Image (cartoon, helix red, strand yellow):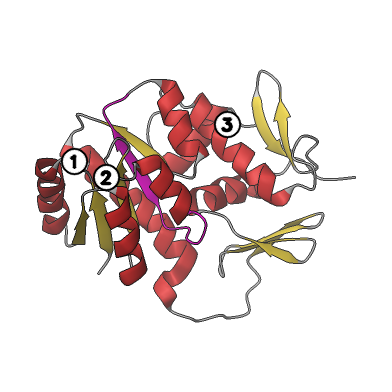
Amino acid sequence: MCRILVCDDDREIVEAISIYLTSEGYEVVKAYDGMQALKALKEQEIHLLLIDIMMPKMDGIHATMKLREQSNIPVIILSAKSEDADKILGLNIGADDYVTKPFHPLELVARVKSQLRRYITLNSMGSGKEEKNDNILTIGGLSIDNDCKRVTVDGDEVRLTPIEFSILHFLMEHPGMVFSTSQIYEQIWEEEAIGADNIVAVHIRHIREKIEINPKEPRYLKVVWGQGYKMEIPK
């Protein structure tokens, strides 16, 4: 059973979210500020974090930054703010998705399920099984193993979040092809791309920082101005 940590200083919101998630078969852990959330993350195995931005003691931004120092579990930011700048801030510090209050509970549940599918696939929920496989894509010194969910650059393993892994795998499956931000978003998030440009761009930047020697002059993940992104085959 997946365990989800819900953190918001509004206890009614926490209770409401808990009811919906519990009805879907998830176990819910509750926290009401960032400090409590980090404590729960240390004491229990958590598979996804839903966290509000504005909270006392420690806000969601700083709590997510602390979490990302040691964990790649999916993080969905909750906030009453809807401006693009706030969404980008949440993504920049390591969140995987962003839901604006007020939200429809069924939409939130759908986003939770989507993020958990990627996380479970990427981590195999601790099964510990590693088998030799041929499902490996290699471009230059970059390799991605879709069975073991492992990425290496020049032989060194790099750690990607589930969203980053999905984007990289998609682009590596189609080397040389250019995809718009809308096409990437619809492929990865499996929903209509509305205002997706900044969201995709932030994740692309994070991937570059992990796989490129010089992210400002990438060898692999190239931008095609006015069109989108492609996976370049180095010469």
In this orientation, does residue 85 appear?
Answer: yes
**Dot in front, 1 or 3:** 3
In this orientation, does residue 193 appear?
Answer: no
Asked if 138 appears above or below 89 in the picture, the reply is: below
Q: Secondary structure at mark 2?
A: helix
Magenta highlight range: 68-81
Question: At which x and y percent is residue 148?
Answer: 57, 70
Question: At which x and y percent is residue 1?
Answer: 25, 69
Separation of marks 1 and 2 at Cα, in angstroms: 6 Å
Label 2 sits on residue? 110
Question: At which x and y percent is residue 73?
Answer: 42, 58
Looking at the rendered structure, the kind of residue marked 2 is: Ala
**Dot in front, 3 or 2:** 3
User: Residue 222 vs residue 33: left or right?
Assistant: right
Q: Secondary structure at mark 1?
A: helix
Residue occupying image coordinates x 43% and y 22%: 84
Label 3 sits on residue? 201
How crowded pointer 3 is (Cα within 10 Å; few <14, some 14-19, many 20+) is rated as some
Separation of marks 1 and 3 at Cα, in angstroms: 27 Å
Label 1 sits on residue? 106
Looking at the rendered structure, the kind of residue marked 3 is: Ala
Asked if 195 appears above or below 206 in the picture, the reply is: above
